[in-house]
């Protein structure tokens, strides 16, 4: 499970596991991580955790949020990244992070859909509906690109998380959960479109033959039966 190590001036103050989907950081008491210092805004930043991936977002704080010395608004946290809030440091430890092959596949498909680059962003993620039916055994989610230079290409959604889109413009992720495949907006002012309807900040469950549009590229979601 990913975790944060809070320190100030080299002194470790606390270690916290990222157990919630959304972890808030700020000066006010209602935050999950409260830092009682005037340099910290009341609601300074938030971290959204999707499986083993964590997305940091600055919540329009007064003094800003920095990662490894660089100011950020939205950022995908990598192992050993250091989030800086005033004099405080939060080191991100990605225990149980996805395998290299999983990370490579996510970036490969991001390239196929749009462009090269490091994806950064954040997402508001909601749990899947409790009444949702489980994914039938022996089936695998698939994406087929319908437009653009890579039209006709298909991708197996065999990994826990697949990143789609164009960094800096529009990014979404598809997560594989026990009760189906869910698409979540990550970055950009324009939200993904499914069957002609723009999504909101919450995770949306994909249904058979849904048509998805991300960064101007249309694609179709469908299931493939793996049983012979």
Image (tube, rainbow, N blue to C red):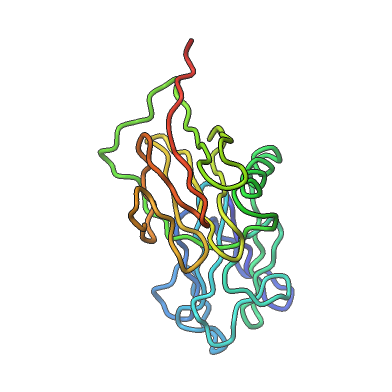
Residue located 45% across and 39% down the image: 220
Provide residue 31's location: percent of width, then percent of height: 43, 72
Q: Nearer the viewer, residue 143 or 56?
A: 143
User: Is 16 above or below relative to 179?
Assistant: below
x then y, percent, for residue 208? 36, 34
Q: For residue 129, say whether it is visible.
A: yes
Above or below, 177 relative to 137: below
Q: Farthest top residue?
A: 228
Q: Tell whether 162 sits left or right of 211.
A: right
Can you tell which quarter of the image residue 133 is in?
A: top left
Task: Examine the rendering and report whether any part of residue 96 can be seen.
Answer: no
The residue lying furthest to the left in this view is 131
> Can you give x and y, in whole percent of width and height, for residue 77 in the image?
63, 60
- How many numbered marks, from 0 up? 0
| Front residue (pair 195, 225) | 195
- Identify the residue at image location x=28%, y=41%: 130
Q: In this view, does 199 lie above or below 218?
A: below
The spot of residue 73 in percent (x, y) is 57, 74
Residue at the location (50% across, 81% down)?
60
Q: Write the residue at 54% across / 87% down.
A: 62
User: Is residue 117 found left or right of 199 in the rendered image?
Assistant: right
């Amino acid at each position: 499970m990913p975790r944060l190590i809070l320190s100030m001036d080299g002194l470790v103050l606390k270690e916290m596991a990222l157990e919630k989907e959304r972890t808030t950081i700020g000066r006010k008491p209602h935050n999950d991580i409260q830092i009682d210092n005037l340099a910290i805004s009341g609601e300074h930043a938030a971290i959204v955790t999707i499986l083993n991936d964590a997305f940091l977002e600055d919540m329009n704080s007064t003094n800003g949020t920095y990662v490894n010395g660089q100011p950020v608004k939205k950022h995908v946290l990598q192992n050993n990244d250091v989030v800086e809030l005033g004099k405080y440091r939060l080191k991100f430890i990605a225990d149980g992070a996805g395998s290299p092959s999983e990370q490579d596949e996510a970036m490969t498909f991001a390239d196929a859909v749009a462009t090269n680059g490091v994806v950064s962003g954040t997402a508001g993620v909601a749990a899947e509906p409790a009444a949702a039916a489980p994914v039938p055994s022996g089936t695998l989610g698939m994406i087929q690109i319908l437009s653009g230079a890579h039209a006709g290409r298909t991708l197996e959604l065999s990994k826990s998380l697949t990143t789609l889109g164009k960094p800096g413009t529009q990014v979404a992720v598809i997560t594989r959960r026990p009760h189906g495949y869910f698409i979540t907006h990550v970055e950009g002012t324009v939200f993904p479109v499914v069957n002609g309807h723009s999504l909101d900040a919450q995770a949306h469950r994909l249904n058979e033959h849904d048509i998805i549009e991300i960064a101007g590229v249309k694609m179709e979601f469908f299931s493939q039966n793996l049983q012979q």
